[in-house]
Amino acid sequence: MLSSYPTNGKNTSKNIRESSIQKKIEKILFSLVNTGLYESIYLYNADGLPLVENQPSSKINNVDPVEISVMMSQIRQALSRLDDLGHINEIVIEGSNGKKIVFRYIYLFEQMTTLIAIIPAGKYYRNITNRLQKTLVQLCETEH
């Protein structure tokens, strides 16, 4: 998990790099929400721990996104065993109001992560989410 806190009372160069990556990711996520491309967006590891300290939104209609992230990771694992689907990259849930919740599974920071994006009704998400994923992967590769 990314953290800007020192390890053993010392701020190592790795922690400084991670803090830098964290700030860059936060800036990207906030920009996407502020432009209206996403209603809200979250990034968690497989245990449901946030990978950035400041998520653009803290609750999904009074539901903790950590709880949803963990639950959807378990569903993803169960679904991947069905009919030899292999690795599931994405799960999309669309409501009757046209709003979508996208769960994108991305390998970042040497671990599987879950990107949760709430997409406003009538907005396209796939192209921008693909570009976001590519940006995050490149950012993590260049910084580590």
Image (spheres, grey):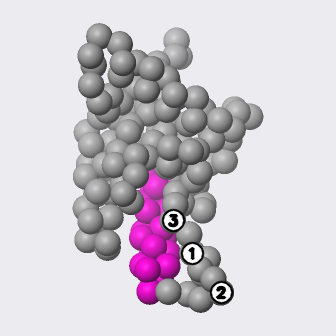
Range shown magenta:
13-33
Image mark for residue 4: 1
Would residue 19 be counted in the magenta stretch? yes
**x then y, percent, for residue 110:** 36, 57
Image point (60%, 60%), residue name: 54
> Is 54 situated above or below 18?
above
SS at mark 3 in the image:
loop
Sequence-first disc among 1 and 2 = 1
Amino acid type, callout 1: Ser
Residue that mark 2 sits on: 9
Query: How far apart, in angstroms, are the residues tagged by discs 3 and 2?
Result: 16 Å
Q: Is residue 104 magenta?
A: no
**Residue 62 position in % (x across, y down):** 74, 34
Closer to us: 18 or 96: 18
Left or right, 133 with reference to 117: left
Q: Residues within 10 Å of mark 2 (few under 14, many from 20)?
A: few
The residue sitting at 40% across, 52% down in the picture is: 111
State the separation of the CA atoms marked 3 and 1.
7 Å
Q: Which mark is residue 2?
A: 3
Q: Please report contact status of discs 1 and 2: CB closer than 8 Å, yes or no.
A: no
Could you give the CA–CA distance between mark 1 and mark 2, rounded to whole angstroms? 12 Å
Residue at image point 27% right, 25% down: 86
**SS class of the residue under badge 2?**
loop
x, y (%) of residue 87? 29, 30
Q: Nearer the viewer, mark 1 or mark 2?
A: 2
Residue 102 position within the rendered picture, expressed as x and y whole percent measured from the top left:
43, 31
Query: Is 71 or 91 nearer to us in this picture?
Result: 71
